[in-house]
Amino acid sequence: MIVEYIRYTVADQFRGEELHRAYVTAAKQLDASPECLAYELSQCEEDTKSWTLRIEWLSTEAHLQTFRKGPHFPVFLEAIRGFMPEIAEMRHYRLTDVHSRKPALP
């Protein structure tokens, strides 16, 4: 598994709300894609102009060769195309053996 991080810096709260709405639409294509294992969109609390999309892919190749050349990518891209100039980073990361997840407290 590979994790892709897409970091956005948007102009203001209104633009952030637009980004959120765009990903509500785009997420339908991620859900439909067998190459995508999970995703989450987060907004920074300290700097509300900063947003990060985290996507878990089967592999970098599955993302770049299969998803991007498949039927779901054009619709995904159309939903978020207007935010491409605001991308600060878009990279794939390999997980290491340093990780843990505790259950959330009630």
Image (cartoon, helix red, strand yellow):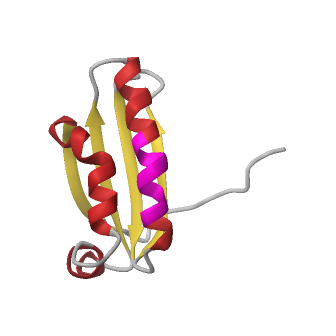
Specify whether residue 47 is in view.
no
**Is residue 44 located in the magenta-colored stretch of the structure?**
no
Find residue 7 and report its horizontal and vertical position in percent. Answer: 29, 42
Is 90 placed left or right of 15 in the picture?
A: left
Residue 64, picture quadrant: bottom left
In which quadrant is the C terminus drawn? Answer: top right
Specify whether residue 97 is in view.
yes
Is 84 placed left or right of 99 in the picture?
A: left
Q: Pick the residue in front: 63 or 92.
A: 63
What residue lies at 30% left-to-right and 47% top-to-bottom?
Answer: 80
Seen from this angle, which residue lies furthest left?
85
Find residue 13 and report its horizontal and vertical position in percent. Answer: 40, 19
Residue 11, picture quadrant: top left
Q: Is residue 35 above or below residue 8?
A: below
Q: Is residue 92 above or below residue 71?
A: above
Find residue 82 and report its horizontal and vertical position in percent. Answer: 23, 39
Is 44 placed left or right of 77 in the picture?
A: right
Is 81 placed left or right of 36 in the picture?
A: left
What residue lies at 43% left-to-right and 21% top-to-bottom?
Answer: 46
What residue lies at 20% left-to-right and 80% top-to-bottom?
Answer: 65
Find residue 1 and report its horizontal and vertical position in percent. Answer: 39, 77
Tell how many labels: 0
Q: Pick the residue in front: 104 or 37.
A: 37
Q: Pick the residue in front: 23 or 99.
A: 23
Which is the main secondary structure of the residues drawn in magenta? helix
Highlighted range, magenta? 22-29
**Is residue 28 located in the magenta-colored stretch of the structure?**
yes
